[in-house]
Amino acid sequence: MIYLGFDVQNKVKQAVTAKDMTKVYGRENQSIIRSPLYSAEIRQGHINSGNPVQTGNNPPVSRNPVTANNGRPVQMGNNPPVSRNPVTANNGRPVQMGNNPPVSKNPVTANNGRPVQTGNNPPINSKPKIIRKRAVSDGVKLISGQKWNIPPMNALKIGIGWDCANTACEIDVSAFMLTQNGKVPDDSWFVFYGQDKSPDKSVSYKSNSENNYSPDDAEMTVKLDSVSNNINKITICVTIYEALQKRLDFSIVNNFYIRLMDTAGKELAIYHVDNISKGIISLVAGEIYRYKNTWKFCSVGNGYRKELSEFCSIYGVEIE
């Protein structure tokens, strides 16, 4: 085995065998680092003060694989180069830095899929604006406050759509299934993106944010014959995610609508909400409610300066 050593008296670099070094220095005085990435050390003191070591005609080798090679990753033997960038290291996967959580290289998918704020800059959202091909509207045109009789049917499909040029504006749809006292029986009767089905499986929610081919931005299915008997009303709310923090409101949203369809997708009725005032960050779009032995739909269209958490408080959903 060959080691790189130093003659302390003459300060002359030389290559010797392990056997020769024992003769020259004595085994008790040997404290030589085997790797050329580190300065040689012996008992009399530190040689080269920990600085990179010159090996032959090769340039000095840094013992710091991160700062070596002008900040570029360094090949360590047969190991892949070490990157000093926690985003690009580990083959592009997030890297655990000490006790901190892994750093995500994708500002769109970090934070549970929500855009991430970086410093004082607005949240980054790389998702392109989706231009949908809307369905041809041939249902009954409803006006605000109108009560419409839902035809006898087992299930009702609901499509909700809007146009917004600002890709930072994320709109969420939710449903509160209310008893006669205007509250949910418990938190499980609140249907939204984080809990997309009701306990009785009668109401389900789906966002079409990743589906460019759907004519609607979001949709719900209500199995009218499966709704629990203690549920009298289903209130459909629409809110802007983090509207106050992002300084967004519904005045930048156009062509908002909610439409009712049968299970085959045939439109039965549609309600457009136009000219929403500045400062409005949420809407009660409509309500499905029991009336004697039938179901009705009321096109509400009321705007509020309330976030989703405030609606939860109103309707009895406990939030942390």
Image (spheres, rainbow, N blue to C red):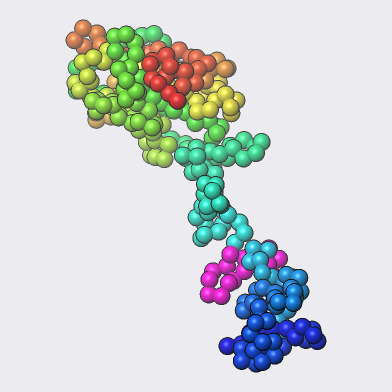
Q: Residue at x 53, y 75 (%)?
A: 78
Residue 183 appears in the picture as rendered: yes
Q: Is residue 79 magenta?
A: yes
Residue 289 position by quadrant = top left
Between 206 and 180, which is closer to the camera in this rendering? 180
> Which residues fall within the magenta stretch?
68-82
In the displayed structure, does residue 292 sit left or right of residue 87?
left
Residue 144 position by quadrant = top left
Q: Residue at x 68, y 81 (%)?
A: 29
Between 73 and 205, which is closer to the camera in this rendering? 73
Question: Which residue in the rendered view is the most extreme toward the front?
Answer: 28
Residue 318 position (above or below residue 29): above
In the displayed structure, does residue 138 sit left or right of residue 43?
left
Residue 288 position (above or below residue 54): above
Residue 37 position (above or below residue 196): below
Residue 52 in the image: x percent, y percent? 72, 72
Residue 216 position (above or below residue 38): above
Q: Quadrant of the C terminus?
A: top left
Residue 128 in the image: x percent, y percent? 51, 41
In the displayed structure, does residue 219 sit left or right of residue 37?
left
Q: Quadrant of the N terminus?
A: bottom right
Q: Is residue 95 magenta?
A: no
Between 213 and 138, which is closer to the camera in this rendering? 213
Q: Residue at x 39, y 31 (%)?
A: 193
